[in-house]
Amino acid sequence: MSLFLSTFVNRIDAKGRVSVPGAFRAALADRAAPGVSAGVVLMRSPVHAALEGFAPAMMDEIAARLDQFPLFSPEQDHLAAATFGECVALGFDAQGRIGLPAELAAHAQITDTVAFVGMGRKFQMWNPQRWSGQRDAASKAVKAQGLTLPKVP
């Protein structure tokens, strides 16, 4: 299964559309259910002034994780609202563009350009200047804390 790798910066046109990088569209297509056209699910990041992007199939995994909480528990309600209540499912036009909803762009302070940042099974969309600061902060944290990947069981 394809992963979301690398960082790309693309312009937003006058109609609020942005071309999703070809490598990301390929990863989304790879993750699409058989017979279903590729699309993308976007939501406000609960952690950063950025957007989170997923293949629609990833939402099933998120639902399964939420199902670990009792159905009407505060944890389940809050996380479901912050996840599913914030999602927007988008399709691609013939040129591989999506229309970036204004409220999502405002949350991420995205105006004329957007940085698409590969994060493995998901990607993020950032204001490029803010991403530069976040990238530097993440690199410093990895070094300062001696972070490494856990072993796979």
Image (cartoon, rainbow, N blue to C red):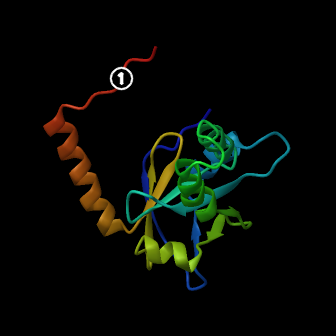
Task: Report if residue 21 is visible in the image.
Answer: no
Say left or right for 36 vs 14. right
Residue 110 is drawn in which quadrant? bottom left
Quadrant occupied by the N terminus? top right
Residue 139 is drawn in which quadrant? top left
Instruction: Give the residue displayed 46% in from the left and 59% down from the top.
Output: 45
Residue 152: horizontal and vertical position, in percent?
44, 17
Instruction: Give the residue displayed 64% in from the left and 67% down from the top.
Output: 97
Residue 70: horizontal and vertical position, in percent?
62, 41
Instruction: Give the residue displayed 49% in from the left and 74% down from the top.
Output: 105
Say left or right for 139 vs 115. left
Circle 1 Cα neighbour tier, 10 Å, few/some/many (<14 / 14–19 / ≥20): few
Q: Which residue is mark 1?
A: 150
In the depicted view, which residue is nearer to us: 153 or 79?
79
Name the outermost residue toward the bottom. Answer: 14
Residue 107: horizontal and vertical position, in percent?
45, 73
Name the outermost residue toward the top. Answer: 153
Asked which secondary structure carries label 1, the reply is loop
Say left or right for 18 vs 143. right
Instruction: Give the residue displayed 22% in from the left and 53% down from the top.
Output: 136
Task: Report if residue 39 is visible in the image.
Answer: yes
Residue 74: horizontal and vertical position, in percent?
54, 52
